[in-house]
Amino acid sequence: MKKVFAMLLAAAMSLSLAACGGQPANNPNPPANSGGSSSSTQTPTPPPADNKPGNDKLVVGFAQIGQESGWRDAETNDIQWYASRNIDTIELHFADAQQKQENQIKAIRSFIEMGVDVIAFPPVVETGWEAVLTECQEAGIPVILVDRGIDANTDDSLYTTMIASDHVWAGEQAAIAMNDLLGGSGVVVELEGTVGASAAVQRKQGFDEYMAKNCSSIEIVASQTGDFTRAQGKEVMESFLKTYNKIDGVFCHNDDMALGAIEAIKEAGLKPGEDIKIVGVDGVKGAFEAILAGEMNCTVECTPILANQIFDTAAKLKAGESVEKWVMSADEVYTADVVAGRAY
Ligand code: GZL
């Protein structure tokens, strides 16, 4: 019991440290935008002269989606902290696209202009990348997709590798947990992530297909996007509660929307985690706290701690080594049993 709790708390702590910009006590360097570019929406300015050929640092351009969730902040802080701890060997150019695809594309084009060694980015949506990825290919700059993918119809030679969790698996695990929580029957609503994002499309696919195939007495009566944000998750859950007089469970494509749904359920005079079962994805600190408080029932982990893999893979690509097309993260399912430590 103590071991599980310590492990979970450590997991939550590392996520929360990364997410809240905090740093382990022994890290003298606060997370910094350790590249030559700004971390605002402006297109990063070209790097100093030392970025020209001959600079033996690994120069990576990272076009981040934005700051829509605690998970996203955890990923950003992990990447910036890792680069700030390795400034002798890594030069990170980091751009924040404020959740706009056009800003990600602008940032990628500026990285091409800089002549970075590798470009890495989480595609905010699955489509609309052919042109800019072709420009990367023509410039001879390998591309790493991070935490989300692009449409299966897009020529996959346009990117070198993807480092991400299996989002279909996450949706299936959420369905298994929800089925268990409802005892095989009930009415469920779904809070979807960003429209067109692979993490949302695939979590929905995993959840809905599992339910259709295995849970004939569970009905999904509504499914609507909350754009992966807590505020919109709350708003959509409020509308569901006004529309449906019986909701037994809610599947949220990420924990931030689950935390918003919890607020809405409480304000409706109901008990989250009891009257309405709540399953999320990500494994952020707030989800563990809600589960420990009995207000949430399960979170399916999707690790945001990818910096090590990103920079290791980038270094291999710079050295001309080949890498797997998909470097899949290993994730766990945290039900209340696991969190309470009864599972061991
Ligand atoms: C998952 C990632 C998703 C998270 C959300 O890999 O793309 O984006 O689940 C985040 O919290 O907004």
Image (cartoon, helix red, strand yellow):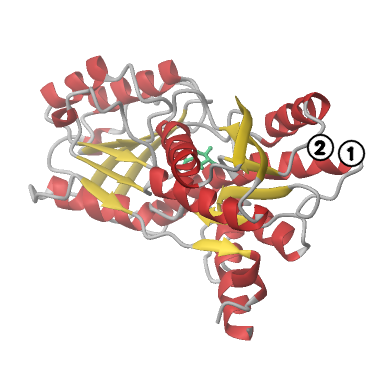
Dot 2: within a 10 Å radius of its alpha carbon, few (fewer than 14), some, or many (20 or more) residues?
many
- Look at the picture and state if 340 lies above or below 17: below
Quadrant of the rendered structure where residue 113 is? top left
Which residue is situated farthest in the right direction here? 269
| Residue wearing tag 1 | 267
Percent position (x, y) of residue 103? 43, 19
Dot 1: within a 10 Å radius of its alpha carbon, few (fewer than 14), some, or many (20 or more) residues?
few
Q: Given the image, on which type of amino acid does mark 1 rest?
A: Glu
Percent position (x, y) of residue 134? 17, 20
| Residue wearing tag 2 | 264
Numbered disc 1: secondary structure: helix
Residue 137 left/right relative to 85: left
- Look at the picture and state if 42 lies above or below 170: above
Percent position (x, y) of residue 191? 62, 33
Residue 83 left/right relative to 75: left
| Quadrant including the C terminus | bottom right
Q: Given the image, on which type of amino acid does mark 2 rest?
A: Ala
Residue at the (52%, 66%) spot, across then down: 27
Q: How many marks?
A: 2
The answer to whether the residue labelled 2 contacts the one labelled 1, judged by CB atoms less than 8 Å apart, is yes
| Quadrant including the N terminus | bottom right
Residue at the (58%, 52%) spot, across then down: 179
Residue at the (68%, 49%) spot, across then down: 278
Q: Tell me: is circle 2 under 8 Å from ligand 1.
A: no
Percent position (x, y) of residue 85? 41, 59
Of residues 210 and 35, which is closer to you in this image? 210
